[in-house]
Image (tube, helix red, strand yellow):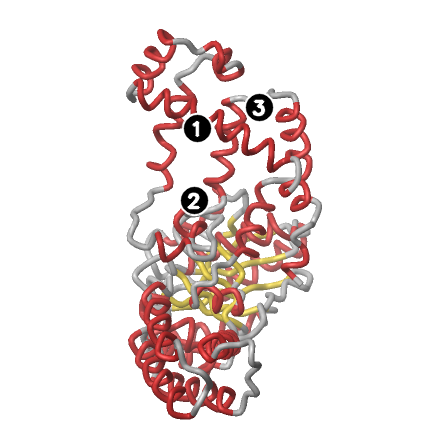
Amino acid sequence: MFENLSERLERSFKILKGEGKISEINVAEALKDIRRALLDADVSYKVAKQFCDDVKQKAIGKDVLTSVKPQQMIVKIVHDELAALMGSEASDINVKGSPAVVLVAGLNGSGKTTFSAKLANHVRSKRGMKVLLAACDTFRPAAIDQLKVLGESVNVPVYSEDGVKDPISIAKNAISKARSEGYSVVIIDTAGRLAVDQELMDEISALHKAVAPTETLFVVDAMTGQDAVETAKAFNDRLDFDGVVLTKMDGDTRGGAALSIKAVTGKPIKFVSMGEKMEALDVFHPSRAADRILGMGDVVSLVEKAQEQFDEKEARELKKKLAKDQFTLMDFYNQIQQVKKMGDIKDLAGMIPGVGKAIKDVDIDNDKAFKGIEAIIMSMTPAEREHPEIINGSRRKRIADGSGTSLQDVNKLLKQFEGTRKAMKSVMGGNLKNMMRGGMGGLRR
């Protein structure tokens, strides 16, 4: 996401490169280009104009330090204004209550049902709360079955009533069940509807009033740009929702919805969803999004994702193995599985400053990236995985044939494994140990 906007803003900043000081003339020229970049990203004209006016006001009235170049100062001001435009701070959801009730609303095809399951997984796994999903989309064929399949995949039960068409009745009964059986949170998946459909809008308003949710989230397809923003505004006028969820952020989106929706609706973006995997849901951090837009990466989020998959106990056990040269190919295989769980590899790489731009045109498929390595390792015997030094020429030929790869591929993997083992031994001795003990905590502050 934001790749095209990042490139355009980078070109805009170059206008100030080499300038000795900030002046109204050179700032105006740069801001003209920045405004075009925002409009091309499908940001509304009104929002883009106000944004540039705010940047200009701060830039012209800024006492520039002699050690800071005009280009650097504008980048800093634009970064701060981008973060403010998107909400400044991350906004948490309210899951307090007995039980807490989260109502999920949105348009047809926006990804509400998938998000509902992702949110259930997020609340259950990250907060340790007992969650119940309520299937209140009685309009779309197979919506209830879809939610049941997704709920089962994240180990969250789904409450539904066969043949019942009244979503209010289903929702109330789900809440009663949750209260009597000790569930902490009920997430209500509702039918998609259009803002222009008065009957359906009346229905969601009545449902909202009947269940009095502690949190109401509006799900928006980020690929619809300004249409998403206008729709969110229309829904907010009826529901007064608490926050926005942007889905399909991994698709062909220019970022206009993310940049405009807070300014237009006054409501924060709370989550962004990318892909179909149930783990692919992130809390939205405006400042980190601004970092990525300006090509600064997002190291904090990368570390947090790593910490979710690698706990301190695993790190200690791995360190012991490395210290004794007992790190095996099966350990290597398990590390690959954990990296895959962190998310899309290209997206993860884009969190590293400077890397996102370098690989923007590279097509990286998570499954294909590791498929050959996994096949080779799983074609080995348990003894070979534990003691790769016993893998001689004939064994390598057998492994290559068994995995559908070449002898060169097997040789390359064994060489990579040895290099990885040495590198990890070095890292485990210092950096990773500190990270697992909270040494990266300063970044979050």
Q: Position of residue 51 (x, y in %)?
A: 43, 84
Residue at mark 1 to residue at mark 3: CA–CA distance: 13 Å
Residue 35: % across, % down:
34, 82
Picture coordinates of residue 432, whole percent (x, y): 63, 41
Q: Is residue 333 above or below residue 366?
A: above
Quarter of the image for residue 200 reads bottom left
The amino acid marked with disc number 2 is Val
Corner quadrant of residue 301: bottom right
* Picture disc at residue 416: 1
- Write down the residue under mark 3: 327
Q: Which residue is mark 2?
A: 149
The residue located at (37%, 67%) in the rendering is: 6
Vertical relation: 211 (above or below) 369: below
Q: Residues within 10 Å of mark 1 (few under 14, many from 20)?
A: few
Residue 200 seen in this snapshot: yes
Give the left or right position of residue 24, taking residue 67 as reference: left
Q: Are marks 3 and 2 in contact (CB under 8 Å)?
A: no
> Disc 1 versus disc 2: distance between alpha carbons?
39 Å
Q: Quadrant of the C terminus?
A: bottom right
> Viewer-proximal residue, 265 or 258?
258
- At label 1, which amino acid type do we have? Gln
Q: Is residue 380 above or below residue 430?
A: above
